[in-house]
Amino acid sequence: MASVDVSIRGAGIFGLCCAWFCVEGGARVEIVDPNGVAAGVSGGLVGALAPHVPENWNVKKQFQLESLLMARDFWPMIEELTGLSTGYAPLGRIQPIMDAHGLALARQRALSAAELWGHHAVWQVQRDSEGWQIESPTGYYIKDTLSAHIHPRLACSALAEALAARGCRVSEAPESVAGATIWATGAAGLEALSQDHTSSVGQGIKGQAALLALDRSGLPQLFADSLHMIPHKDGTLAVGSTTEREFTCASTTDEQLETLLQRARQLVPELKNAKVLTKWAGLRPRARSRAPMLGTWPGKPDHYIANGGFKIGYGMAPKVGIAMADLVLKGAQTYPAAFDVSENY
């Protein structure tokens, strides 16, 4: 067998971003996934790149901020290299403000965003819903310009194509002897880590979402009543998602999705007659710390972990890719110590 510097296990968003930045660092890289590109949770429908609220700042929120800012150049670059759409749209997010307490809190957060986000983005209170037909009990809405959205399946396909152009393709089984291996295998990877340990290091949390035939492209994403509504550039609208710790089947949709759609249609009347094009269910990998889990696999030299994206994997992925390339290729830990695998062990 030939040899490579790095073998990436998992062709989801973490694995593909790790591969990209390892290739950028001069490494010979292979990607291995028996199910192909974005076959797991990275092949979902929603694609909300949305920040945590700008308060109670910590290393996770700072890392996410930096990654969301990186995305502004990263995804357009992938589109330019491949001629393929990733669905990336840096159009912000709208949230209706439900009561007087929420209004006061939103105004306070506008001040903290100015301090924490600097000149990069704003969090503001406004009366404009920016094209969404949704009522706000207070008459006010939050608009943040840090949020963006992406089409998950298109983004992974375009990134895989960009990697293929650099000689790094996705194969069903290892074709080379690797110097190092990065395991970016999502919920299954958390389960494998837990079996290696005395207690669970994380678990898969089921999510369900739907794609509707409603063209609201050009609008910011909408977040209301804990629901994300994402107007994709291809003229579809994604609605999601559930958060289920207990479930019978990880890959099938059920009445919980129907309830979610009913809530969305009550909030946004224009959704009532929109045809459901497809439904999706999958397991998001949530580490015990709820932060990304990065670093060396304890007891396994030359094996590394990139996992725990949970609900913010796409937003975190570009910076996760850089951090893992720094660790594997340079031996440098450039991610927060709180993210290290050892913190979950």
Image (tube, rainbow, N blue to C red):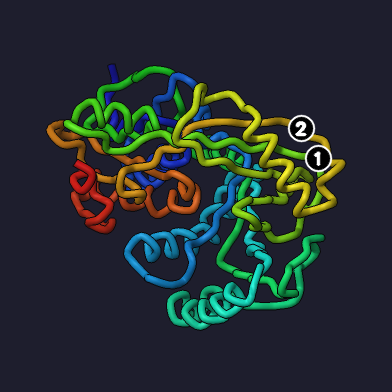
The three-letter amino acid code for the residue at tag 2 is Leu
Q: Which residue is mark 2?
A: 277
**Mark 1 vs mark 2, CA separation in Å:** 6 Å
Q: Nearer the viewer, residue 242 or 51?
A: 242
- Left or right of 24 in this view: 201: left
Q: Is residue 311 visible?
A: yes
Residue 149 position, x and y percent, is: 61, 53
Task: Identify the residue at image location x=72%, y=51%.
Answer: 231
Q: Characterize the local packing of mark 1: few (<14), some (14-19) or many (20 or more) Cα atoms within 10 angstroms.
A: some
Task: Identify the residue at image location x=59%, y=53%.
Answer: 226
Quadrant including the C terminus: top left
Residue 201 position, x and y percent, is: 27, 38
Q: Which residue is mark 1?
A: 213
Give the mark, 1 or 2, whose residue is nearer the N terminus.
1
Residue 34 position, x and y percent, is: 44, 19
Residue 89 position, x and y percent, is: 65, 56
Q: Is residue 167 visible?
A: no
Circles 1 and 2, Cβ within 8 Å, touching? The answer is yes
Q: Characterize the local packing of mark 2: few (<14), some (14-19) or many (20 or more) Cα atoms within 10 angstroms.
A: few
Where disc 2 sits, the SS reads: strand
Residue 259 position (above or below residue 107): above
Q: Nearer the viewer, residue 210 or 48?
A: 210
